[in-house]
Image: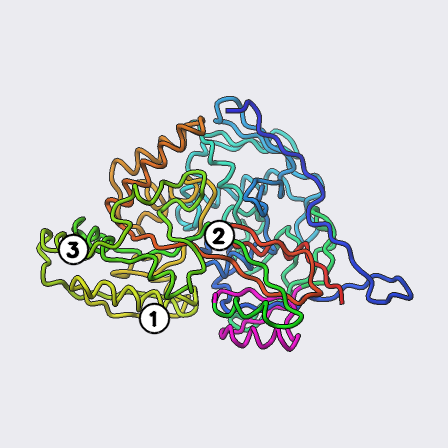
């Protein structure tokens, strides 16, 4: 491993405000009218797991580092950082200009308090498992934070690049206002939010990342994405997040509209609950994996707009799919496995999916229902509103679930919360064995890239074989914009943080 990993903070998100009054040359900004189909389910950045919540909160809250459009780590609240030779100590220098929205400086005390909150089991933080390696946090001066780790931990830096690791005010933690009030340090300030209806954010004129070229964001929640397309066509909306691939394909056909599209690391998956009934049997889970035609699910639900994937969605670590267990549909093998498990006549079960998030969820559930009926598994589809779905998901209160889960550029950061014995979402996965836990630990500690790849490919092969979940495919992120909206770049994480770089040039 390199002796030092250091970055320096440059000007991030600087946008040029173009004049709307050519004769006077005066630069004018305005609010960007934004629409999306799914709203946030809460305002606590440490607790939220839904994509809709994360993309909203990351406009207001900041982590220490973030991922750019190439999934490279770049500065956020930390202007520079350095690992020691053993990757057991990470020293970070805060950006001197970083301030919270109330004007107070972001300090090492806020960083320490934020991670103490994340690590507090009673809080129920979504990313807690990524930070249990922290043994102590030092704050030697007004700008420095030192994370002391319990062993080599290369993926620790990547884990910091998430709004689930946002830095919040120590005073807000003490007051108990996280989740009810929003005082972040990001490019936009909270002004108002009417759940499932609308929100207004205003530009942070003192943002340490650079100048925001627009005055703010007027956000509308329009559950029907065809209505979002109509709003774009009529210029009632300047920028829209699109989830439905069919709607996305129509955008370039409309005059004056542009489509921003990028492959993402998030993955569509059939989550099985290995603690329930027949699913406790490995051969039943394997039979399900063999019975699923992943390409057919992709083609039917997502119009082929994506790629079949194994558990690891990042190209640097992914195993060739012909080396993964039963990645081509094999109904004969599936039928045999069902018989060997004692379920030759099949069984009945429920499959849970969220309404509208992703918009392909209902279609995925229907295709899977049809495919699994071929081996005698009769599924009843339960469609739930997103907030209800999330509640059931977090409690592992389901037989099977159609899910869209987030991806990361590092396998450990992506999966340790599910597939380690101490993972904070291990209850959701409801499956763990010594091999998965050991391989995760080895991947965390190994610093040699080639050896890490070998470790995680072994992890991926084993995970596919024991089949607690059935991974399906990855897709794309889509954003529709007016042709006068410039500066937005989609990212592999599906982040909307790039709205900080947008300018409106009417």
Residue 256's x, y, as percent?
67, 70
Q: Is residue 339 left or right of residue 118?
A: left
Residue 383 is marked as 1
Residue 109's x, y, as percent?
59, 39
Q: Is residue 409 left or right of residue 283?
A: right
Instruction: Say which residue label 2 marks.
Output: 264
Q: Secondary structure at mark 3?
A: helix
Q: Is residue 136 magenta?
A: no
Q: Are marks 2 and 1 in contact (CB under 8 Å)?
A: no
Alpha-carbon span between mark 3 and mark 2 = 33 Å
Mark before the other along the chain sequence, 3 or 1:
3
Q: Residue at x 46, y 45 (%)?
A: 408
Mark before the other along the chain sequence, 2 or 1:
2
Placement of the C terminus among the 4 image quadrants: bottom right
For the residue pair 97 and 36, the one nearer the viewer reads as 36
Mark before the other along the chain sequence, 3 or 2:
2
Callout in the foreground (2, 1): 2
For the residue pair 65 and 117, the one nearer the viewer reads as 65
Callout in the foreground (3, 2): 3
Q: Residue at x 40, y 31 (%)?
A: 452
Residue 417's x, y, as percent?
38, 45
Residue 332 is marked as 3
| Magenta segment boundaries in residue numbering | 217-245
Residue 237's x, y, as percent?
63, 72
């Amino acid at each position: 491993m390199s002796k030092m990993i250091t970055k320096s903070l440059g000007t991030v998100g600087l946008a040029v405000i173009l004049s709307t009054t050519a004769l006077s040359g005066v630069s004018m900004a305005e609010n960007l009218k934004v629409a999306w189909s799914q709203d946030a389910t809460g305002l606590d950045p440490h607790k939220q797991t839904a994509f809709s919540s994360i993309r909203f909160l990351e406009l207001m809250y900041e982590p220490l580092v973030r991922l750019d459009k190439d999934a490279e780590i770049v500065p956020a609240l930390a202007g520079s950082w350095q690992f020691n030779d053993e990757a057991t100590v990470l020293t970070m220098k805060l950006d001197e200009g970083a301030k919270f929205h109330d004007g107070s400086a972001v300090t090492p005390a806020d960083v320490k308090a934020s991670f103490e909150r994340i690590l507090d089991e009673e809080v129920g933080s979504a990313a807690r498992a990524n930070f249990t390696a922290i043994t102590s946090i030092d704050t030697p001066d007004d700008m420095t934070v030192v994370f002391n780790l319990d062993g080599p931990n290369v993926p620790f830096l990547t884990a910091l690049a998430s709004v689930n690791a946002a830095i919040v005010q120590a005073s807000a933690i003490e007051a108990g206002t996280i989740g009810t009030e929003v005082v972040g340090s990001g490019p936009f300030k909270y002004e108002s939010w009417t759940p499932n209806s609308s929100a207004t954010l205003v530009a942070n004129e003192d943002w340490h990342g650079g100048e925001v070229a627009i005055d703010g964001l007027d956000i509308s929640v329009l559950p029907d994405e065809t209505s979002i397309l109509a709003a774009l066509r009529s210029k009632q909306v300047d920028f829209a997040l699109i989830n439905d691939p069919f709607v996305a394909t129509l955008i370039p056909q409309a005059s004056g509209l542009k489509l921003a599209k990028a492959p993402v690391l998030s993955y569509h998956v059939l989550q099985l609950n290995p603690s329930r009934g027949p699913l406790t049997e490995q051969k039943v889970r394997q039979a399900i994996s063999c019975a699923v035609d992943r390409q057919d699910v992709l083609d039917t639900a997502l119009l082929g707009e994506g790629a079949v994937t194994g558990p690891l969605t990042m190209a640097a670590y992914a195993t060739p799919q012909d080396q993964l267990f039963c990645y081509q549909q094999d109904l004969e093998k599936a039928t045999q496995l069902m018989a060997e498990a004692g379920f030759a006549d099949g069984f009945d079960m429920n499959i849970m999916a969220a309404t509208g998030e992703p918009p392909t969820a209902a279609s995925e559930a229907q295709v899977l229902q049809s495919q699994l009926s071929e081996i005698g598994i009769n599924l009843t589809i339960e469609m739930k509103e997103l907030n209800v779905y999330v509640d059931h998901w977090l409690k592992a209160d389901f037989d099977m679930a159609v899910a869209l889960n987030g991806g990361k550029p590092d396998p450990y950061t992506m999966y340790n919360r599910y597939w380690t014995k101490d993972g904070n979402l291990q209850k959701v996965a409801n499956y763990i064995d010594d091999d998965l836990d050991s391989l995760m630990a080895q991947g965390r500690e190994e610093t040699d890239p080639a050896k890490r790849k070998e470790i995680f490919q072994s992890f991926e092969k084993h995970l596919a074989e024991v089949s607690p979940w059935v991974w399906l495919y990855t897709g794309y992120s889509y954003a529709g914009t007016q042709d006068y909206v410039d500066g937005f770049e989609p990212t592999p994480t599906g982040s909307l943080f790039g709205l900080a770089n947008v300018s409106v040039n009417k």
